Image: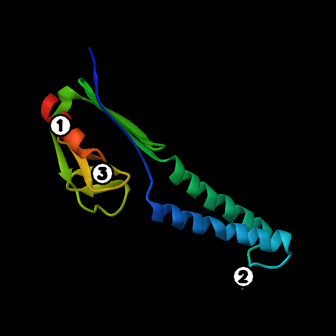
Amino acid sequence: MTKILFKEKQKFTQWWLWLLLIGIGLIPLVGIYSQFILGEEFGDNPMSNKGLIIFSIFIYLIIYLFYSIKLKTVISTDEIYFKFTPFLSQKVKKDDISSLEIVNYGFVGGWGIRYGSKFGTVYNIGGNKGLAIKLKNGKKFLIGTQKNKELERIVKEFF
């Protein structure tokens, strides 16, 4: 019978990131207010009204993307499942795993999905600790975690 051993759900919660995104989100609001409400051009080289609307939609879609990104990890007695919403999900059967290790992966060029590190593909939301997984077929990847102590205990006990 399959038993859930570990669950974690992560989101971008870095205050400085949200401060930056909110700051960027204010720019189109000021432009819309200036051009549509006050009737004045916004900036030295203003966009057309249509361009300003398209730019605003683009900026708010990027902010929404950051809001919607989640990294969910579930480890059971049979498999490791993770979902990096809205991009991908993957299941790995216990029998396909060659090795598991909790590592400090340092800085791999930022957060998100990173290719080409010594751990293979890195999926992370923040921090610098993760579960390095090496498969029997030679592929490897890393799932970031904020619960490294709990995860280390699970890996030692069940794998």
Give percent across and percent down for residue 65: 54, 52
- Kindly identify the amino acid type of the residue bearing the numbered disc 1: Arg
Q: Nearer the viewer, mark 1 or mark 2?
A: 1
Task: Evaluate if marks 3 and 2 touch, with contact meaning CB atoms under 8 Å apart.
Answer: no
- Please indicate whether residue 55 sits to the left or right of residue 98 in the image: right
Q: CA distance from mark 1 to mark 3?
A: 21 Å
Comes first in the chain, label 3 or label 2? 2
Q: Which residue is mark 1?
A: 153
Identified at 55% across, 63% down, the residue is 21
Give percent across and percent down for residue 83: 40, 38
Q: CA distance from mark 3 to mark 2?
A: 41 Å
Identify the secondary structure beneath mark 2: loop
Q: Nearer the viewer, mark 1 or mark 3?
A: 1
Give percent across and percent down for residue 62: 56, 57
Q: Which residue is mark 3?
A: 122
- Kindly identify the amino acid type of the residue bearing the numbered disc 2: Gly
Number of the label disc, if any, that sits on residue 24: none
**Are there few (<14), some (14-19), or many (20+) residues within 10 Å of tag 2?**
few
Task: Evaluate if marks 1 and 2 touch, with contact meaning CB atoms under 8 Å apart.
Answer: no
Residue 152 picture quarter: top left
- Kindly identify the amino acid type of the residue bearing the numbered disc 3: Val
The residue at the far top in this view is 1
Q: Which residue is mark 2?
A: 43
Q: Nearer the viewer, residue 38 or 149?
A: 149
Vertical placement of residue 34 versus 109, above or below: below
Comes first in the chain, label 1 or label 3? 3
- Specify the quadrant that holds the N terminus: top left
Task: Evaluate if marks 1 and 3 touch, with contact meaning CB atoms under 8 Å apart.
Answer: no
Identified at 21% across, 44% down, the residue is 149
Residue 127 picture quarter: bottom left
Q: CA distance from mark 1 to mark 2?
A: 56 Å
Comes first in the chain, label 1 or label 2? 2
